[in-house]
């Protein structure tokens, strides 16, 4: 089974905010975030997928998700491209 780590971005007034997560079904997960059924932090915003990467196991995806969550420099760089 494959898992995805993803980064989504939303405009919040005059700045961009980002959210990092992992999932088995990337397309469905983005739809859920935009319907307000994702994580509490993501409710009420429109999100755009700007980064995703595929992993073979859930544990690999969780480790990489944690790394991306803590890597603020990379997240800022990816947000600037959006």
Image (spheres, grey):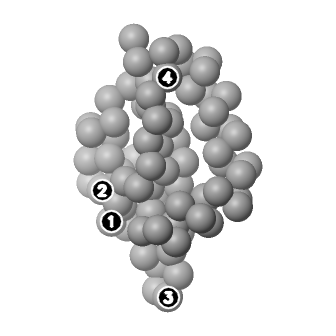
The circle on residue 55 is: 4
Q: CA distance from mark 3 to mark 2?
A: 20 Å
Q: Mark 2 — residue?
A: 34
Circles 2, 1 touching at the beta carbon (< 8 Å)? yes
Q: Secondary structure at mark 2?
A: helix
Single out the mark in the foreground, 3 or 4.
4
Q: Is residue 56 visible?
A: yes
Q: CA distance from mark 1 to mark 4?
A: 26 Å
Percent x, y of residue 69: 66, 48
Residue at 41% over, 18% down: 2
Single out the mark in the foreground, 1 or 4.
4
Question: Nearest the camera: 49 or 29?
Answer: 49
Q: Mark 3 — residue?
A: 14
Q: CA distance from mark 3 to mark 4?
A: 34 Å
The circle on residue 46 is: 1
Mark 2 or mark 1, earlier in chain: 2
Residue at 60% over, 21% down: 60
Q: CA distance from mark 4 to mark 2?
A: 24 Å
Q: Is residue 19 above or below residue 25?
A: below
Quadrant where the C terminus sits is: bottom left
Circles 1, 4 touching at the beta carbon (< 8 Å)? no
Mark 3 or mark 2, earlier in chain: 3
Question: Nearest the camera: 36 or 5?
Answer: 5
Percent x, y of residue 30: 32, 47
Percent x, y of residue 24: 38, 25
Q: Secondary structure at mark 4?
A: strand
């Amino acid at each position: 089974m494959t898992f995805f780590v993803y980064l989504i971005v939303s405009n919040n007034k005059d700045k961009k905010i980002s959210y990092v997560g992992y999932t088995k079904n990337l397309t469905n997960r983005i739809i859920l975030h935009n319907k307000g059924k994702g994580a509490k932090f993501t409710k009420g915003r429109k999100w755009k997928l700007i980064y995703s990467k595929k992993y073979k196991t859930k544990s690999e995806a969780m480790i990489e998700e944690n790394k991306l969550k803590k890597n603020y420099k990379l997240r800022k760089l990816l947000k600037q491209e959006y």
